[in-house]
Structures are given as C-alpha cells and as structure tokens.
Amino acid sequence: MIKLGFYPGCSLEGSSREYSESVMAIAKKFDIELVQVPDWNCCGASAAHNMSKELALSLPARIIALAEKAGFDELVVPCAACYNKITVTKHELFEDVTLKERVKDIISLDYTGNIKILNVIQMIEKYIIKDIDFKLENKFLHKVACYYGCLLVRPTKILQFDRPEDPQSMDNVMRAIGAEPIDWAFKTECCGAGLTVSRPDVVNKLSGNIVEDAISRGAEAIVVACPMCQANLDMRRPGIDKYLNKKTTIPVIYLTQAIGLATGCTEKELGLQRHFVPVNLS
Amino acid sequence: MSNTNTHTLKKHTLSGDIKEHTDVSTAKCYQCGKCSAGCPVVNDMDFPPSLLLRMLQVESDQIDEKVLRSLTIWLCLSCEMCIGRCPQEVDIPKAMDYLRSVSLKKNMQNPKAKHIIQFHRAFLDSINYTGKLYEMGLIADYKTRSLNLMQDVAIAPSMYAKGKLSILPEMVKDLKNVKKIFNKTIKDKEGR
C-alpha cells in the first residue's frame, strides 16, 4: 500500500463532500492510503489574494509546513483551487528568499518547500492509471466534456501541468476507462469562480455558456476536477437554465466519480446522490 | 556609486508602484487586445483589461484614480486567461491583486463592488475565526453584511438535505497560530 499526504481543503468537507468521498473510494480501490495533513487550515481560496498578498501566501505556507512536519514527500490536493494556491505559494517562496523568510516568521513554523504537490489527475496518472485495466468492471461508455477550468492549468509557467489552451490529461484518463471525450471550446474558460455568491448573474452567464457548449457538442456529462466549477455548474443550474432559457439535464461529475463507476464502486460510495442535477450514467 | 537625479525626480505613479511591488511592467503592453478578447467578464467591466493597462501607461494622477475606483479590478476573476495569452507576459492578475489592495487602503472601492468585497471579507473572517471555511457561517455573515437576505434561500435546505452543509464549524486546533497570521498580515495594514 502506498501512503500519501492528503489535503482535502474546506469544500471537500462541506459543499463538495462527494468529491472527497469519491477520491477516498478510488484510492481504496487502488491500495493508496491518503493521510490528512494534521490540523490543516483553509488555503485562502478566492478571497485572500483579493485582500492581502502576505495573507494569501501565509495560509498555504502553513499547510505546506504542516505537511512537511508530518513527513510526507508528496501531498495530494484534489481541489483545483487549493492545488493552485499551494503550488503558486511554493513557487513564489522559492523565487524570493526574503519573502520566504518573512512568511516563515508570519506562520512561526519551519518551511522548506521541498514537498511535491499532486493534483488529482497527477495522482491518477502516477498511481492509478497503470492498474486501471485490471480493475475495470464496467467501461464508462459515455461521451464526456472534460472541463478543466482555470486553476488546474493557469498560470502555466508555474503549474507546468498541461497544455494551457487544449489540455489533454483528463481526456486521457477518461479514454482509459472507456469514455469518449469530445472536442469543445470551453475546456479552460472560467465558470465565474468565487463570484458565485456576490455576483450570481455573472456566474450564471459564464457557467451557462459552458453547459450550453457541452450539450450542443453531444456530451452526456461534464467531467470536472474542481469543487468550485462543480458547484457553479451543478448547484447554480436553476439560474443557468434561466439564463439559457431552457431546461438542461446534463450532469456534472468529478473524474474520480467516473473512475469509481467504472471500477465497481457504488453510487453511494461516490456520493452521486448529493448532486443537484441527477446523475444517471451507470 | 554615482547618484543621478533621474530616479529622485521621477514622478510617483501607480504604474511605478505596481512595478515596485509586483515587478509587473505595464509599459510592456503594446495594446494587442488579446487579454480583453479572452477575458470572460469583459462585458461587465467598466474598462476592459487592455484599456486599464493603457490608462496606467498615461501616468496621470486623475487617470490612476479612475483605475483605483474602477469596477474592473473587483470583477476580475483571476482566471489568468489574460496572462496565459499575453505575448508580452504582462501579469495582469498580479497587478489586479495589487490594485485591489491599494483601492482598499485608499478607500476608493467602486460602489458597485460593495457585495464582492463584503463576500471576500466574510470569507476571510470565517478563516480567521475557525481556521477553515465555515460555509454556513460565511453565508449568514455575508447576508448580514449585504442585506441580501433572500438570495439562495431556496438552495440551502436542499444543500442541507444532500449533506452539503455542516451546521457546526470545523475548527483548527492551533487557532492562535491562524489568528497570528491574520494579525501579522491584514489587521496591521488594513486598519479594520
């Protein structure tokens, strides 16, 4: 069994707990033990950087420091926003020694920045994909729109994860479980992100355009790896439908849920009952 | 070391401050417009991102103030599409973060950004009080600040029924450490 550090982040313990459930379910299936960072805090998400640069660096730095203290070499961060904030912080503190010392003083913890951060797709590529053929029980024979959003791919220079305009990593994972990823135009367009509460009108429009393009190109599901994207495309669906002036039924699932369905996890283990737009894909 | 007067005589400008604090050079922008073409919220902004850069290049106090009072800086989603496509690699999102902090310090926030800022504040207060995001508390706090009491009342019961809302907050054990981080970063500077 492989043991990896795990930072769930706040969404995965609240409004997106089905993401956490499905990450844990597939980890178990593939003999990976995910161990939570002790006493972790919020990464600051979409709010901290809007208000203070030092705060936006210190919150993720505390998480990295605690993960290092716990002795992890690799830290799995499924939430795209947390993955982004933690990776960018690691980069900024690596580039600027003075800033690193300042942040170390603010968090009052040792910090090296040597830990490797893995987003959920990287965890799958590294530890799951090689065994996927052995574990496949029901191929996931659906047309899917792989939606990456902003935070997994940008800023490209720092994250260096996938192609910025037409990323392929999630498409490849979906192909491996039998799905057919479609070509579409909104793979990395923003869903409206953190404006979901303060400007729902903007979110309905941006998310509506994403939903509309996925449907018009024949997708049966939108596959995501970000709780903020999932919440905006799923929970905001009544507003989206109002903006699109029609009723839409395309479900928005996490890629871990798709893998779970293909490898014989139950719908309940994957938290599919928690979605607002019903998921009928098995 | 020779000390020429060119630096000391140079006018204090917002673009100079941006360069000093973020190392983003607005002077590099040659107005190709790719940022504005790709920006998902450009239609709701008062100035598109490329125009904002042009305004900063002018280096006039009055226009600098217009930038700080703009809705654009608050509507920016930090989606990073602009920097992803900029041929000159002008890091607009980084500049936006800085412009927002200056706008707050100078109390020049655009009135239409009131709710956006209230939400950010409610969000950060939640982290300050519990170390984590307490979603139920955040929504309650935002509603009290914004008086948008009826917004999303339809969603909350279903969220609860689907197990997506926790009634009680999860707390970081070492809350003192988190509070210290807040005190050393924003409390000192924003004078809240």
Image (cartoon, coloured by chain):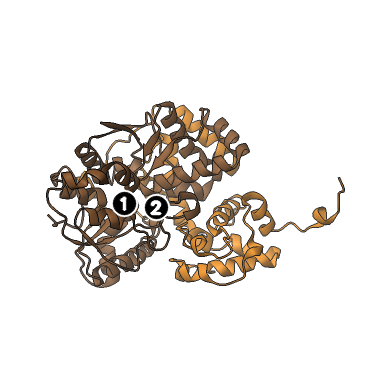
Chain colours: A brown, B orange
The reply, left or right, for residue B134 in relation to residue A33 is: right
- Between B5 and A96, which is closer to the camera in this rendering? A96
Q: Which residue is mark 2?
A: A152
Q: Position of residue B32 (x, y in %)?
A: 57, 72
Q: Residues within 10 Å of mark 2 (few under 14, many from 20)?
A: many
Mark 1 belongs to chain: A
Q: Amino acid at mark 2?
A: Leu
Q: Residues within 10 Å of mark 1 (few under 14, many from 20)?
A: many
Q: Amino acid at mark 1?
A: Ala
Q: Position of residue B124 (x, y in %)?
A: 45, 43
Residue A225 marker? 1
User: Is residue B192 at least partly visible in the picture?
Assistant: no
Relative height, residue B52 to residue A274 (above, below): below
User: Is residue A243 at least partly visible in the picture?
Assistant: yes
Cα–Cα gap, marks 2 and 1: 8 Å
The reply, left or right, for residue A91 in relation to residue A120 is: right
Residue visible at 37% across and 59% down in the picture: A167
- Between B94 and A15, which is closer to the camera in this rendering? B94
Q: Tag 1, which secondary structure? A: loop
